[in-house]
Image: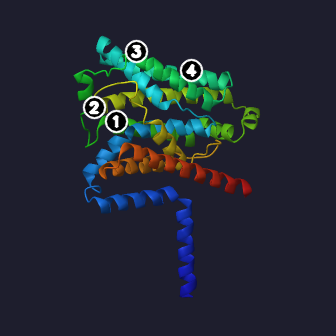
Amino acid sequence: MRAAASKSIVTRFAQWVAGYPVLVGLGLLVLFFSLRNPLFFTEGNARAILRQLAPIGIYSFPVALLLIGRSIDLSLGAVVGLSSVIGIEVMNAAGVTGGLAAFLGVGLGAGIVNGLLVSYARLDPIIVTMGTSFVFRGLSLSVSGGKAGVPPAAFLDAFRYEILGFRPEIYIMLAVLALCWWLLHVSRAGRSLYAAGENERVAFLMGVKVRRLQFLMHCATGLAGGVVAIVSVAKLGLSGGGIGESLTLPVITAVFLGGVDFGGGMGTIPGVVAGVLFMGVLQAGLLILGIGEFVQQIIVGAVLIAAIYMSTRSRKRLSSQ
């Protein structure tokens, strides 16, 4: 009797682990890094990790909606770089308010370009956004001349204030999280995104304006890039065409870790939250251990491959049921 009960508990635990691999991995990461460095599992370091992962989180949630609707954007980092360069140029010339509008306007403009090419010109999103990433990066280098821009002190000071122990970028990330959760899990747009991701033609016959929906998701992703540029410049204290180059891979990895499928139609915002936390803890832990940047890229790339593998396995399992 006891043996059967023990076997049942082990089976349920194994099923839970299989159902929530990212949460299990997150717990193991925290345990591993805490054992290697006792200062890792502290309140101060937790706040530092949140500040570090804020740009990834702000970007990951709209990117998740885009992928669920069966599209993708590989120009994420280039949009941040272009937004930061033009935003700081305008900010130094016309003031903080004008600069912030330029940050957001450039990001939205990039999203509109991607959205028009993907949704209405019907071009492959991978090829298109890979191409626009080179265009945006070239534009940012042309505008900046390869030199870093320095934002005004008033802008930097605004992001140094803390409310309840957290800086503004944390609240921005939480606001984006809440908005994307509402859009996907409460609003009609979320049901349309799932339908478009599952089967575009069926969704169209159901009355879903698939092209317009994908276009709007690209616009939202571009706008998020402008927000990420603001946060990144405030954190680093400078702007530059290469400021967002290291963002694309962690963002895409976090989204896939969160259970969003490359083929669209599958994924949740709570799952993406787990993926973002995993990437934030992983990057912070590697930095604390003194792991070099190139090795970090290898590790993040390996995690991305594992995430895509899990996503493929999950889709095959669901399709066979």
Q: Which mark is residue 99?
A: none
- Count neighbours of disc 3 (C-alpha within 10 A) and say few if under 14, some if 14 to 19, many if 20 or more: some
Q: Is residue 202 above or below residue 155?
A: below
Q: Mark 2 to mark 3: distance in Å? A: 25 Å
Q: Amino acid at mark 4?
A: Val
Residue 101 image position (x, y, % from top left): 39, 18
Q: Is residue 230 above or below residue 317?
A: above
Of badges 2 and 3, nearer the viewer stands: 3
Q: Mark 3 to mark 4: distance in Å? A: 19 Å
Residue 108 image position (x, y, % from top left): 49, 22
Residue at 65% x, 42% y: name it: 263
Say which element carries label 3: helix
Residue 61 vs residue 93, the one in the foreground: 93
Q: Amino acid at mark 2?
A: Phe
Q: Amino acid at mark 3?
A: Val
Q: Mark 4 to mark 1: distance in Å? A: 27 Å
Residue 131 vs residue 30, the one in the foreground: 131
Do the numbered discs 1 and 3 sit on residues whose CB atoms are within 8 Å?
no
Nearer-N-terminus badge (2/3): 3
Label 3, on which residue? 143
Label 4, on which residue? 113
Q: Mark 4 to mark 2: distance in Å? A: 30 Å
Of badges 4 and 1, nearer the viewer stands: 4
Residue 228 image position (x, y, % from top left): 41, 31
Do the numbered discs 4 and 1 sit on residues whose CB atoms are within 8 Å?
no
Nearer-N-terminus badge (4/1): 4
Label 1, on which residue? 169
Q: Which mark is residue 159?
A: 2
